Amino acid sequence: GAYDLPENPSPLEKMKYDICQNILGYKLTNHSTTQQIAQQIQLSIAETEELLFCRIEKFTLDRLVVYASKLFSPSHIKITNNLILEILEQKLHAQKVNPMSDSHRLWGKDVFL
Protein backbone atom coordinates (compact mmCIF):
# COMPACT_ATOMS: atom_id res chain seq x y z
CA GLY A 1 0.00 0.00 0.00
CA ALA A 2 0.86 3.66 -0.04
CA TYR A 3 3.41 5.00 2.39
CA ASP A 4 2.81 7.97 4.65
CA LEU A 5 5.17 10.70 5.75
CA PRO A 6 7.26 9.98 8.84
CA GLU A 7 6.46 11.81 12.05
CA ASN A 8 8.05 15.30 11.95
CA PRO A 9 9.09 15.12 8.27
CA SER A 10 11.87 17.33 6.96
CA PRO A 11 11.09 19.93 4.27
CA LEU A 12 12.80 17.65 1.76
CA GLU A 13 10.60 14.69 2.71
CA LYS A 14 7.49 16.88 2.44
CA MET A 15 8.45 18.08 -1.03
CA LYS A 16 9.20 14.58 -2.29
CA TYR A 17 5.91 13.31 -0.85
CA ASP A 18 3.97 16.20 -2.42
CA ILE A 19 5.44 15.47 -5.84
CA CYS A 20 4.55 11.77 -5.55
CA GLN A 21 1.02 12.68 -4.46
CA ASN A 22 0.66 15.07 -7.41
CA ILE A 23 1.79 12.39 -9.86
CA LEU A 24 -0.68 9.94 -8.29
CA GLY A 25 -3.39 12.60 -8.59
CA TYR A 26 -2.50 13.06 -12.26
CA LYS A 27 -2.83 9.30 -12.80
CA LEU A 28 -6.25 9.17 -11.13
CA THR A 29 -7.61 12.34 -12.75
CA ASN A 30 -6.58 11.22 -16.22
CA HIS A 31 -7.66 7.60 -15.66
CA SER A 32 -4.17 6.49 -16.70
CA THR A 33 -2.69 3.07 -16.07
CA THR A 34 0.60 2.61 -14.24
CA GLN A 35 2.07 1.46 -17.56
CA GLN A 36 0.95 4.70 -19.27
CA ILE A 37 2.50 6.82 -16.50
CA ALA A 38 5.70 4.74 -16.68
CA GLN A 39 5.93 5.42 -20.41
CA GLN A 40 5.29 9.15 -19.97
CA ILE A 41 7.94 9.62 -17.29
CA GLN A 42 10.28 7.04 -18.85
CA LEU A 43 10.58 4.75 -15.83
CA SER A 44 10.15 1.02 -15.38
CA ILE A 45 6.75 -0.14 -14.16
CA ALA A 46 8.31 -1.30 -10.86
CA GLU A 47 9.90 2.13 -10.22
CA THR A 48 6.69 3.89 -11.24
CA GLU A 49 4.76 1.78 -8.71
CA GLU A 50 7.27 2.80 -6.01
CA LEU A 51 6.74 6.44 -6.95
CA LEU A 52 2.93 6.09 -6.93
CA PHE A 53 3.10 4.40 -3.51
CA CYS A 54 5.13 7.39 -2.25
CA ARG A 55 8.30 5.41 -1.48
CA ILE A 56 10.13 8.73 -1.17
CA GLU A 57 13.32 7.15 0.18
CA LYS A 58 13.81 5.53 -3.25
CA PHE A 59 14.00 8.86 -5.12
CA THR A 60 15.98 12.07 -4.95
CA LEU A 61 14.13 15.36 -5.17
CA ASP A 62 15.76 16.25 -8.48
CA ARG A 63 14.67 12.93 -10.03
CA LEU A 64 11.09 13.50 -8.88
CA VAL A 65 11.11 17.02 -10.34
CA VAL A 66 12.27 15.59 -13.68
CA TYR A 67 9.43 13.04 -13.67
CA ALA A 68 6.86 15.66 -12.68
CA SER A 69 8.08 17.98 -15.45
CA LYS A 70 7.20 15.28 -17.98
CA LEU A 71 3.57 15.38 -16.81
CA PHE A 72 3.03 19.00 -15.75
CA SER A 73 3.85 22.38 -17.24
CA PRO A 74 6.76 24.27 -15.61
CA SER A 75 4.32 26.76 -14.07
CA HIS A 76 2.60 23.87 -12.25
CA ILE A 77 5.81 22.89 -10.44
CA LYS A 78 6.20 25.48 -7.70
CA ILE A 79 8.26 24.04 -4.89
CA THR A 80 11.39 26.14 -4.67
CA ASN A 81 10.14 29.24 -2.83
CA ASN A 82 8.16 27.27 -0.25
CA LEU A 83 11.06 24.91 0.36
CA ILE A 84 13.54 27.77 0.79
CA LEU A 85 11.14 29.61 3.11
CA GLU A 86 10.66 26.52 5.25
CA ILE A 87 14.41 25.88 5.45
CA LEU A 88 15.02 29.52 6.40
CA GLU A 89 12.36 29.31 9.12
CA GLN A 90 14.02 26.19 10.53
CA LYS A 91 17.43 27.89 10.43
CA LEU A 92 16.03 30.96 12.17
CA HIS A 93 14.55 28.76 14.89
CA ALA A 94 17.87 26.90 15.24
CA GLN A 95 19.71 30.22 15.51
CA LYS A 96 17.40 31.35 18.33
CA VAL A 97 17.99 28.07 20.14
CA ASN A 98 21.73 27.99 19.42
CA PRO A 99 22.92 31.40 18.15
CA MET A 100 26.19 31.05 16.28
CA SER A 101 26.32 33.92 13.80
CA ASP A 102 24.28 36.51 11.94
CA SER A 103 24.34 34.56 8.70
CA HIS A 104 23.98 31.02 7.52
CA ARG A 105 25.17 29.26 4.40
CA LEU A 106 22.37 28.10 2.12
CA TRP A 107 23.38 26.43 -1.13
CA GLY A 108 26.71 28.23 -1.15
CA LYS A 109 25.25 31.70 -0.56
CA ASP A 110 25.12 33.77 2.59
CA VAL A 111 21.59 34.27 3.82
CA PHE A 112 21.19 36.96 6.45
CA LEU A 113 18.43 36.46 8.97
Image (cartoon, rainbow, N blue to C red):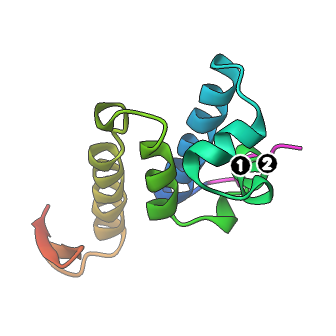
**Does 48 appear above or below 108?**
above
Residue 102 visible (yes or no): no
Q: Is residue 103 left or right of residue 59?
A: left
The stretch in magenta equals 1-8
Marks 1 and 2 close (CB-CB < 8 Å): yes
Three-letter code for the amino acid on which mark 1 is drawn? Cys
Q: Quadrant of the N terminus?
A: top right
Three-letter code for the amino acid on which mark 2 is drawn? Tyr
x and y, in percent, of residue 108 in the image: 18, 79
Q: Looking at the magenta stretch, what is its main secondary structure? A: loop
x and y, in percent, of residue 90 in the image: 37, 59
Secondary structure found at label 1: loop
Q: Which residue is mark 1?
A: 54
Q: Quadrant of residue 82?
A: top left
**Does 31 appear above or below 109?**
above
Q: Is residue 5 left or right of residue 96?
A: right
Residue at position x 13%, y 74% from top? 109
Q: Which residue is mark 2?
A: 3
Closer to the camera in the image, 68 or 86: 68
Residue 70 visible (yes or no): yes
x and y, in percent, of residue 24 in the image: 66, 34
Q: Is residue 26 left or right of residue 31?
A: left
Residue at position x 49%, y 37% from top? 71
Tag of residue 22 = none
Image mark count: 2
> How dense is the environment of label 2, judged by Cα within 10 Å: few (below 14), some, or many (20 and up)?
few
x and y, in percent, of residue 34 in the image: 76, 39
Closer to the camera in the image, 17 or 45: 45
Q: Quadrant of residue 62?
A: bottom left
Residue at position x 52%, y 55% from top? 64
Mark 1 and mark 2 lie on one chain; the one further toward the N terminus is: 2
